[in-house]
Image (tube, rainbow, N blue to C red):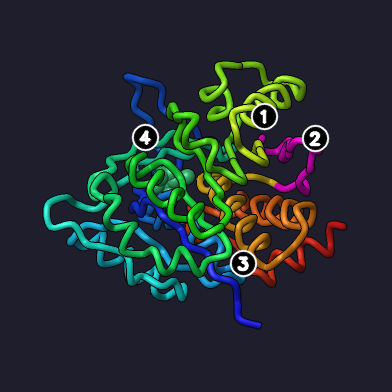
């Protein structure tokens, strides 16, 4: 059987990461940091997560013509990702994220989207044949919304399910939410989209139901160490992750979305796909960085079996 194809439309960044014992507060300087340059960007992270989990991935993105962009493209190709629809901006530099990571893996992120902002609907239209051939379209909102919407409309035209990771938190029109099969907000994004701020399980479920009512078919809220809440018209279920020592949570949500898409594209049931993606995300938080922390399919399978 041919390995199922996933098309990811989204951002690619270079993450400039400082890890320190404490996160700085506004106006404060923290001096004990260690610096690393790592591959990131929500779109690229999800593409890498899906590829390592065994999917064939085509990535649609806009990367600058600079050294950061060259390195990003090289890394994506090394992952076996099809970069035919990655365009290179002449005007804008590549996207950059400045990231501070604290002792328990918590983080602060500030992004200059740069070339990501120049990914246009026409760039996506150029990839229509790939979208038509895909088992799943994956998108986030770190690139312009009209570009994301164009991709989702193309997917709908060809009967391809859409997984939208509504990150980073931003208002979304209901016309867009109606096109979503799988919506994967974290708790911050859920609160932003629904106006509900409570963090109890009941609050999460109420928020997820609100998004279902707006048109998403399945809402999967990622709640860190508490696991994932899956809501659809029939049921609500919680999936608890294996216990791990988190050292860096950057990209954990991307890992969940990418691996979920890969598993669903392979034809797994929702139940199995969610459990697999939860295990993958738990592995990813035990290692530094976004893309470098994404586990291979073998690693996920082996953790999955030792845990169940
Ligand atoms: O989701 C994590 C990602 O957000 C980082 O890799 C950073 O680049 C930002 O896009």
Of the numbered discs 2 and 1, the one sitting upstream in the chain is: 1
- The magenta span reads 223-244
Please tell me how crowded label 2 is: few (under 14), some (14-19), or many (20+) other residues with Cα within 10 Å.
some
Residue, disc 4: 31
Q: Is residue 4 above or below residue 15?
A: below
Of tags 2 and 4, the one toward the viewer is 2
Of tags 2 and 3, the one toward the viewer is 2
Of tags 3 and 1, the one toward the viewer is 1
Q: In terms of depth relative to the viewer, which is nearer, 191 or 128?
A: 128
**Residue 299, percent across and down?**
69, 68
User: Quadrant where the N terminus lies?
Assistant: bottom right
Residue, disc 1: 208
Please give the label number shown on residue 236: 2
**Residue 158, percent across and down?**
51, 60
Q: Could you tell me which residue is drawn at 67 percent across and 29 percent down? A: 208
Total marks placed? 4
Please tell me how crowded label 3 is: few (under 14), some (14-19), or many (20+) other residues with Cα within 10 Å.
many
Of the numbered discs 4 and 1, the one sitting upstream in the chain is: 4
In contact (CB < 8 Å): disc 3 and disc 4 = no
Please give the label number shown on residue 53: 3
228 in magenta: yes
**Residue 66, percent across and down?**
18, 60
Of the numbered discs 3 and 4, the one sitting upstream in the chain is: 4
Q: In terms of depth relative to the viewer, which is nearer, 117 or 148?
A: 148
Q: What is the CA distance from the residue labelled 2 to the residue labelled 1?
A: 9 Å
In contact (CB < 8 Å): disc 3 and disc 1 = no
Q: Is residue 306 left or right of residue 56?
A: right
């Amino acid at each position: 059987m041919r390995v199922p194809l996933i098309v990811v439309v989204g951002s690619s960044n270079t993450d400039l990461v400082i890890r320190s014992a404490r996160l700085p507060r506004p106006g404060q300087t923290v001096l004990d940091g260690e610096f690393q340059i790592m591959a990131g960007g929500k779109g690229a992270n999800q593409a890498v997560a899906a590829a390592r989990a065994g999917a064939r991935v085509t990535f649609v993105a806009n990367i600058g013509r600079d050294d950061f962009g060259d390195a990003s493209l090289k890394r994506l190709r090394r992952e076996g990702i099809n970069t035919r629809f990655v365009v290179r901006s002449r005007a804008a530099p590549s996207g950059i994220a400045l990231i501070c990571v604290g002792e328990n893996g918590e983080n602060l992120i500030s992004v200059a989207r740069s070339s990501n902002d120049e990914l246009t609907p026409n760039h996506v239209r150029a990839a229509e044949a790939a979208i038509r051939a895909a088992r799943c379209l994956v998108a986030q909102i770190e690139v312009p919304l009209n570009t994301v919407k164009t991709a989702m409309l193309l997917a709908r035209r060809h009967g391809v399910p859409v997984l939208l990771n509504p990150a980073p938190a931003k208002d979304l029109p209901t016309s867009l939410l109606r096109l979503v099969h799988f919506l994967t907000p974290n708790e911050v994004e859920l609160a932003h989209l629904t106006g509900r701020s409570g963090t109890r399980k009941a609050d999460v479920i109420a928020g997820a139901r609100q998004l279902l009512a707006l048109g998403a078919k399945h809402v999967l809220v990622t709640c860190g160490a508490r696991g994932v809440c899956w809501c659809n018209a029939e049921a609500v279920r919680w999936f608890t992750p294996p216990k791990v020592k988190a050292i860096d949570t950057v990209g954990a949500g991307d890992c969940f979305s990418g691996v979920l898409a890969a598993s669903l594209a392979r034809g797994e049931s929702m139940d199995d796909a969610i459990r697999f993606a939860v295990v993958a995300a738990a592995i990813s938080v035990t290692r530094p960085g976004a893309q470098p922390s994404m586990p291979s399919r073998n690693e996920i399978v082996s953790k999955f079996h030792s845990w169940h």
